[in-house]
Image (tube, grey):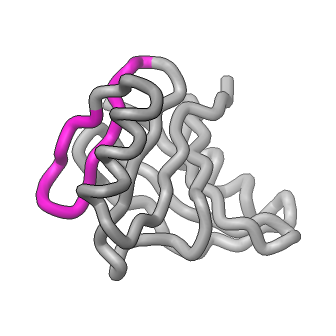
Amino acid sequence: MARLNYVELPVSDLAATRSFYEQLFGWSLTAFGPSYAATISGDTDLGLQGDPAEATAAPLPVIEVDDLESALAGVTAAGGTVVRPIFAFPGGRRFHFRDPSGNEVAAVRSG
């Protein structure tokens, strides 16, 4: 199974952007340190990355997979490029890759 479970936005002003989405949609965003906040709905969630060193250049779709290692191996077999190997973060492990058109995407395994 693979499904879109997260979209991470690079933000230049975390407080203002967090407030914007909370006011606009009535969402509650949880702070995960001084430079990150996210919804925790259990459905497709939104993350706000305020750390320029960690932020991607464009919105980052995150696809949940059952087997992270198999997905990693499948990226190159399917014609993509791994740009950030598997790493741990609060909530699971993920890696980043580029598709043949240059879009950066992440694959994640929660837990």
- Looking at this view, name the residue that lies furthest to the bottom: 53
Q: Based on the displayed image, in which of its 4 quarters is residue 28 positioned? A: top left
Tell me: residue 24, above or below residue 1: below
Tell me: residue 8, above or below residue 87: above
Tell me: residue 34, above or below residue 7: below
Q: Residue 21: horizontal and vertical position, in percent?
A: 41, 39
Quarter of the image that includes the N terminus = top right
Find the magenta span and give its range.
Answer: 29-42
Q: Based on the displayed image, in which of its 4 quarters is residue 60 positioned? A: bottom right
Q: Residue at x 71, y 73 (%)?
A: 81
Q: Residue at x 27, y 47 (%)?
A: 37
Horizontally, residue 105 falls left or right of residue 38, namely: right
Q: Residue at x 18, y 44 (%)?
A: 31
- Looking at this view, name the residue that lies furthest to the front: 23
Horizontally, residue 80 falls left or right of residue 12, namely: right
Q: Nearer the viewer, residue 82 or 30?
A: 30
Please, what is the dominant secondary structure of the magenta stretch? loop
Q: Based on the displayed image, in which of its 4 quarters is residue 111 positioned? A: top left
